[in-house]
Image (tube, helix red, strand yellow):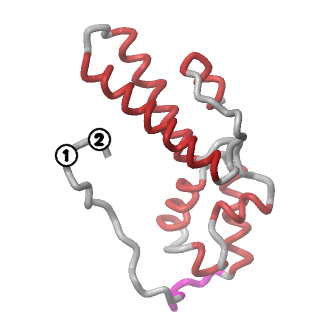
Amino acid sequence: MHSRKKGKSGSNKPSAKIKRSWNIHSAKEVEQLVIKLAKAGNNSSGIGLTLRDSYGIPDVKLVTNKKITQILEENKLNKKLPDDLIALIKKDIKLMKHIENNKKDMTVKRGLILTESKINRLAKYYKRSNKLPVDWTYDRSKAKLLIE
């Protein structure tokens, strides 16, 4: 986003949207696994990785016709803040700790500014889509309280 590169690297899902024959789990079992992993403290992306790597479920939506976040919302297990916003806030906290110890590190100072702008941009989107309250603002001094 803030670099001069195009950023096309990353994994892509297979284009075929079919349920694989080797997938032995039913929709109920997958939903129960998602609930169990959420109660263990995993976020939705962590749940997806665990299901893929440990249980051999490549895509929850193909099996259950619901996304992981929809399953969590139905069972009231979703968090106050979305996962991507939490990850950016954690990154901001980590950068703040670094800059306290290394006051002359201007590269990190720029990274801190860019991270905060990403947080504000994402928060604006979530306010528009009613996933965050309209009066929610990011305050760097209270960032640690948001995560806990």
Viewer-side residue, 128 vs 80: 128
What residue is rendered at 65% in x and 79% in y? Answer: 65
Q: Assess disc 1: are there few (<14), some (14-19) or many (≥20) residues with their C-alpha within 10 Å of its C-alpha.
A: few
* Residue at 40% in and 23% down: 95
Front-lying residue, 19 or 107: 107
Q: How many marks?
A: 2
Side of 45 relative to 112 (left or right): right
Dot 1 falls on a residue whose secondary structure is: loop
- Element carrying mark 2: loop
Give the side of residue 126 with respect to residue 84, left or right: right
Question: Does the residue at mark 1 contact the one at mark 2 (Cβ under 8 Å)?
Answer: no
Residue 80 circle label: none
Give the answer, above or below, for where 21 lies relative to 54: below
Tell me the chief SS of the magenta region.
loop
138 vs 28, left or right, is: left
Q: Which residues are magenta?
A: 19-25
Residue 135 in the image, given as x and y percentages of width and height? 70, 33
| Disc 2 crowd, CA 10 A, few/some/many (<14, 14-19, 20+) | few
Q: Where residue 129 sits: x, y (%)?
A: 65, 54
Q: Is residue 23 magenta?
A: yes
- Name the kind of residue labelled 1 in the image: Arg
Name the one closer to the observer, 88 or 133.
133
Determine which residue is flagged by label 1: 4
Please determine whether, in this image, residue 110 is positioned above or below residue 56. Answer: above
Tag 2: residue type?
A: His
Mark 2 lies on residue: 2
Determine which quarter of the picture holds residue 6: bottom left
Queried whether the magenta region covers residue 117, the answer comes back as no
